[in-house]
Amino acid sequence: MASHGVAQPEGAETWKPRHNVWLIGISVMLATFMEVLDTSVATVSLPHIAGSLSATRDESTWVLTSYLISNAIVLPTSGWLGNVLGRRRYQLLSVAVFTLASMWCGAAASLGMLIVARVVQGAAGGGLQPVSQAVLLESFPPHKRGQAMAFYGMGIIVSPLLGPLIGGWITDNYTWRWIFYINVPVGIVALLMISTFVEDPPYIGKLKERTIDYIGFGFLAIALTCIQTVFDKGQEADWFGAIWVRWFVAIAAITMIAFVVRELSTSAPIVNLRVLADRNLATGVFLIGLLGVVIYGTTALLPLFLQDLIGYTAFDSGYAVAPRGIGAILSMLIAGRLIGRMDERLMIVIGVLIRGASLFMLGDLNLTLSMSSVVWPNIVNGFANGFLFVPLTTMAVKTLPNELMSAGTGLYNLLRNMGGSFGISLVTTLLTRGQQAHQDMLVANLNNSDPVYRSSFLRLSHFLALHAGNANGAHMAMGDLYRQLLQQSTLCSYVDDFRLLAYLSLVTLPFLLFFRNPRGQSKRPAGIH
């Protein structure tokens, strides 16, 4: 894995880059900003993508999950590739492939083509974040590395928050295809800046890199691909009612077990599972996976809700979600000052409670909401970020030896991406199932024996009969009442999903008791991804 705050190789402290360190920082962060932005830029465009490519709402979310899962598969290899190819060369290759894949996404003529392009895009971007972090840590002198990580952290936090706003504006004013085409000029500038300002330390070429664990990587890739396919397509195939679902689950289980056995038995694992013997890291990995479900699930749900039921445009839904960044920036500033002065476990409790409160606020949304009804829960939701990410990462690596820091943060980031991908699939599946269940319950009231329904039907049919005649008026009244029933059943399903995410957030609280907080150990966050 890439270096994330670990002990530096011999010569690292004496080497200095030839160019200004801030030019180097801007060069690597421009590429990273573009990559992170693409995790969220498509969220508000999903209805447009679905309509343009003749896909369902559920199918359109594959655009998000395919990117996340390919990103997660490549993550464990990023450090090895960076050291073998050289970090500068690896970044140039990643940015070039990412830019070409972005053009492919924009030109996609079918959903299948778009998903394949997103897989390539996610794989190319998988190593940009950890390698960029390693370049920053090596380029900045020790006394300025705090500034480097603050610069890195702001870019990682701000870009996914700007994604829905930028994606919405582009989709409404041009077409969803330009949310991918816009990466092309940015990628070209990033390539020019990286090739000009970034350089590898002399010891990179001298590192004796082990041969990559191709067998372990193969097991991991097969397992994640199979299980993500089941998550994405299981709903339309009626889950275990389909033979292929049962086969894919079996293959995923077998390859995941084989992966675990392989990584625990080989001397050079691609993912060092032995680090999970550290109780803090094991707890942190579990919690970031669970919080990944909550965070990415919320990010996928809210734009769909605003466009499906409230009638917002893509830009309006992005505008309503964007204030989450205000809360995130404020909490990051506060959390940065509190780390080391306040028990990190208490900070996480505060973050979880804030996150849960914001999700319960979203669970009270209705069909007559105003913009402020969405903006304030989003500000509160974003404010939870600083009290979750910073202290959670700190606690996860607090008792981990420096030589295992890179392996620990790599596993931590892998579980976050896997949790996020699973979260998006989970909420969209529950949304469809919940809508059907609520529709079945509500439709029982559409009968003449129900006085409320009878009164509403007669009143509406009489009104419509004045314009369309008695027969047509009755048919139109029935259609309008059924449309309202569909709206209400969909609303109830969204409310259920938001409340489920709130409860999942609160479920993390008891697991904080597993964290140890030894006195005298207060490592700064390493490898926030």
Image (cartoon, grey):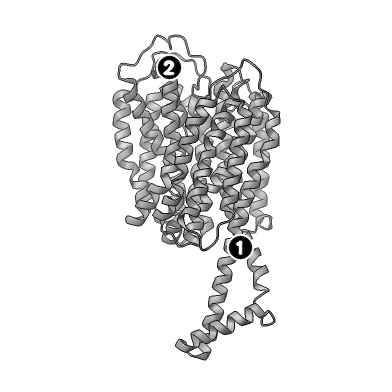
Above or below, comparing residue 60 to residue 212 in the picture: below
Q: Is residue 385 visible?
A: yes
Q: Is residue 232 visible?
A: no
- Name the element at disc 2: helix
Residue at which label 1 appears: 435
Q: Which mark is residue 204?
A: 2
Above or below, comparing residue 378 to residue 393 in the picture: below
Q: Quadrant of residue 517?
A: top right
Q: Amino acid at mark 2?
A: Ile
Between 505 and 29, the one nearer to me in the picture: 505
Residue lying at 61% horizontally and 61% vertically, measured from the top left: 492
In x, y percent, where is residue 457? 58, 81
Marks 2 and 1 in Cβ contact (< 8 Å): no
Q: Earlier in the sequence, mark 2 or mark 1?
A: 2
In x, y percent, where is residue 245? 64, 52
Using a 10 Å C-alpha cutoff, classify the residue at mark 2 as few (fewer than 14 neighbours), some (14 to 19) or many (20 or more): some
Describe residue 238's horizontal placement relative to residue 172 as left or right.
right
Mark 2 or 1: in front is: 1
Above or below, comparing residue 317 to residue 471 in the picture: above
In x, y percent, where is residue 254? 68, 39
Using a 10 Å C-alpha cutoff, classify the residue at mark 1 as few (fewer than 14 neighbours), some (14 to 19) or many (20 or more): many
Residue lying at 39% horizontally and 54% vertically, measured from the top left: 315
Describe residue 346's horizontal placement relative to residue 110 as left or right.
right
Question: Distance from label 2 to label 1 (Cα)?
Answer: 55 Å
